[in-house]
Amino acid sequence: MTDQDRDGTYGTEKQPARSRRRFPGISSRAYEHPADRSALVALRKLSGFDTVFKALSGLLPERSLRLLFLSDSVRVSEAQFPHLHTMLLDACYILDLEKVPPMYVTQNPVPNAMCVGLDEPIIVVTTGLVELLDEEEMRAVVGHEVGHALSGHSVYRTVLLFLTSLAVKVAWIPLGNVAIMAIVTALREWFRKSELSADRAGLLVGQDLSASMRGLMKMAGGNHLHEMNTDAFLAQAEEYEAGGDLRDSVLKILNVLPRTHPFTTVRAAELKRWSGSRDHQRLMDGHYPRRDEDKDTKVSDSFRQSASGYAEEVRTSKDPLMKLVTDLADGAGDLGGRLRDRFTGGNRPNGNPGTGPEGPSGGDGRG
């Protein structure tokens, strides 16, 4: 891939009229969510891990996927969906991804996009998504998928797709599905974190927070922006994160387990927070880790950063379960009373859990 010419051309395509900052040699560590980064660095440091995964290529349907998209989808190029082709080249230029991945548009009314492939990533977007988003919103999505490619997520995404399909096929085998679903559950947890990373990559490519927000709102509510409001949408995320009691916290966990993506309002709130962070500002100022430094990355450093990120998330979270964890870590007493109050959403007289006149279980014994 050649550098951008002085006249603004990149290959045979023109750069968008609005100037965007480029990030030469950027490492995916620059935008990866702490949990995502920690998991990937640990996996990459395991001797032969990628080799073992690629050895599964005989079992995985990658070749079939490539032939399927080639035969029954439209490959993005200068001749087909040229505006998407320009976005793809632009995204690869901004994130300095040397090999531009093939991109396909497939007929599906459900708005979706994915990056799959073992040896080489493939980006696939549905017609539902292309028809739903405007140009700047779509640019953030293309940047999102290029971020997946740069991070190496396509390998694990392909494995997840394969194992999810396999789990359905072996569901009748006693205990056979249990082991596979354990792996699928772990991969889904990682992939949800990787989506937060890719959202950040999309913002780095589009460099337009409002477009990223609009895209997420459309994914949640359809093409009715005139009926939606960004502040109100973000308020939903705050209500979701803070509302209810411990029962709601448990239900949130159960609701998200079968999903590969975080809830849309949560993604919007996460991206908004990161866009205003010091890390994002330093990155935009040109201070970021480079790929040529990746080989020197220590697993211990990644885990330390991840632990710090989790600690901050717990400390600032408004979720009842996280608040309870913080209270206990701060040495708060009366565990039984706090657990009951958090599950019931109630407080004791004078705000002192467990010390009311009716005793520890209340007047009717039901708590």
Image (cartoon, rainbow, N blue to C red):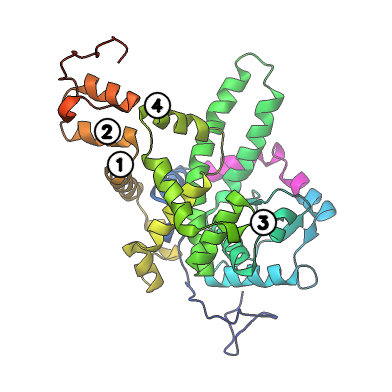
3 or 4: mark nearer the eye: 4
Q: Circle 1 sits on which residue?
A: 314
* Mark nearer the N terminus (4 vs 2): 4
4 or 2: mark nearer the eye: 4
Location of residue 156 in the rendering, given as x and y in whole percent from the top left corner = 57, 44
> Magenta part of the protein: which range?
49-65
Q: Circle 2 sits on which residue?
A: 325
Q: Circle 3 sits on which residue?
A: 123
| Res. 148 mark | none
Q: Circle 4 sits on which residue?
A: 247
Looking at numbered disc 2 in the image, what kind of residue is underneath it?
Val
Residue 53 visible from this viewpoint:
yes
* Mark nearer the N terminus (3 vs 1): 3
* Circle 1: element type: helix
293 up-or-down from 115: above or below: below
* Mark nearer the N terminus (1 vs 2): 1
User: Badges 3 and 1: C-beta atoms under 8 Å apart?
Assistant: no
Q: Main secondary structure of the magenta part?
A: helix
| Quarter of the C terminus within the rendering | top left
